[in-house]
Image: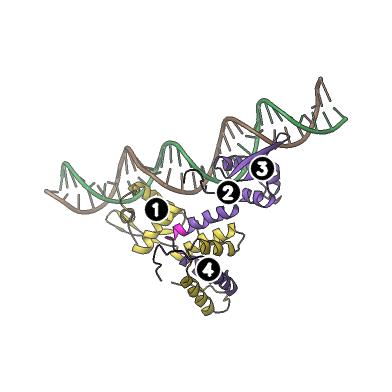
Chain colours: A yellow, B purple, C green, D brown
DNA sequence: TAGTTTCTCCTACGAACGTAGGAGAGAGCC
DNA sequence: GGCTCTCTCCTACGTTCGTAGGAGAAACTA
């Protein structure tokens, strides 16, 4: 993997990306205003983060409207989440089991979730070397 | 929650804690030497992290042998993992579903795991559903 | 065209992290 | 009782993150 890094995104960076993922290409102002008014970061704060995301190749400038740049996500929500989960699993030595235990104990996993998971797993084709991109 | 903080631990901090969890109360030197020789951090690096963990109340001094302090974990491995998982879930808006999807897609969850999970969930004392999970 | 608004771009700064060196104190060896 | 080894404690430094101000350019507005 030389050309397509999967940058690690921080909490705030994720929140900005969330805006792009849900609203599509947006300006800094639009991203900033997607934050709940209470505790909304300053315009320049959002801007700084956008620039950092740009440096990380998590988003890119797409065009310019007036004097404002429009940014769009380069990494998908799925890819970003995958990265997060893989990191977490890494901390657990790659075993998913502690994760499952906790989810169950804290009641965050319902029977329905498990049924879905089972169905999904059954439906999966046998370990395909190519990763089936969803979305 | 005033008295029992669940400090956020970083990757390196987790690794130090791991030594304490598996080997029991240890000195700085013992913790340092639990690292694989290749890429082992300097003694003082480990020490600095130990002090920071102490400041976070993740571990405490237990006694002194010679001029060396012996440290023991205050937070349990389980609690630390829970904290990690909760944080991750927070980033996903508290929904476990994306997590499950990814585990399944990346082949890190087996049917056996799911059966176990289901069994565990069934055996759990009923919790009143605070929020109606979306499907 | 001049004023006002809005953006961009640059700079800054404190906290947290990973990393580690150096001074000095205490322990053990001979 | 020195000498050496080890450990503690203090200090430091580059990076990333969250936060944001200010200068100046560009664009809309009257």
- Residue A106's label in the rendered image is none
Residue hosting label 2: B75
- Quadrant housing the N terminus of chain A: bottom right
Q: Badge 3: how crowded within 10 Å, few (<14), some, or many (20+)? A: few
Between the C-alphas of marks 1 and 4, the distance is 42 Å
Checking the image for residue B42, the label placed there is: 3
Disc 1 vs disc 2: Cβ atoms closer than 8 Å? Answer: no
Pointer 1 chain: A
| Callout 2 crowding tier (Cα within 10 Å): few <14, some 14–19, many ≥20 | some
Q: Nearer the viewer, mark 4 or mark 2?
A: 4
Q: Are marks 4 and 2 in contact (CB under 8 Å)?
A: no
Q: Residue at x 58, y 43 (%)?
A: B53
Marks 3/1: CA distance? 36 Å
CA gap between label 2 and label 3 equals: 24 Å
Which of B106/B69 is in front? Answer: B69
Q: Would residue A1 be seen by someone viewing this image from the given angle? A: no
Q: Earlier in the sequence, mark 3 or mark 4?
A: 3
Where's residue D14, x and y in %?
A: 54, 41
The residue tagged 4 is B121
Alpha-carbon distance for marks 3 and 4? 45 Å
Secondary structure beneath dot 3 equals loop
Q: Earlier in the sequence, mark 4 or mark 2?
A: 2
Position of residue A106 in the picture relative to residue B112 (left or right): left
Instruction: Please tell me which of labels 2 and 3 falls first in the chain.
Output: 3
Residue linked to disc 1: A50
Q: Nearer the viewer, mark 1 or mark 2?
A: 2
Q: Residue at x 56, y 63 (%)?
A: A101
Residue B134 located within the stretch drawn in magenta = no
Query: Mark 2 falls on what kind of element?
Result: loop
Tell me residue B68's x, y (percent): 70, 36
Q: Which residues are magenta?
A: B89-95
> Is residue A89 shown left or right of residue B22?
left
């Amino acid at each position: 993997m030389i050309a397509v890094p999967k940058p690690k995104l921080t909490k705030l960076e994720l929140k900005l990306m969330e805006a792009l993922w849900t609203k599509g290409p947006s300006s800094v102002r639009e991203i900033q205003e997607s934050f709940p008014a209470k505790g909304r970061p300053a315009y320049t704060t959002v801007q700084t983060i956008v620039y950092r995301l740009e440096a990380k190749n998590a988003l890119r400038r797409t065009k310019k409207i007036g004097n404002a740049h429009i940014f769009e996500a380069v990494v998908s929500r799925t890819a970003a989440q995958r990265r997060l989960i893989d990191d977490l699993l890494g901390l657990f030595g790659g075993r998913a089991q502690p994760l499952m235990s906790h989810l169950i104990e804290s009641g965050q996993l319902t029977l329905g979730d498990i049924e879905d998971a089972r169905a999904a797993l059954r439906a999966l084709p046998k370990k395909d070397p190519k990763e089936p991109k969803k979305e």
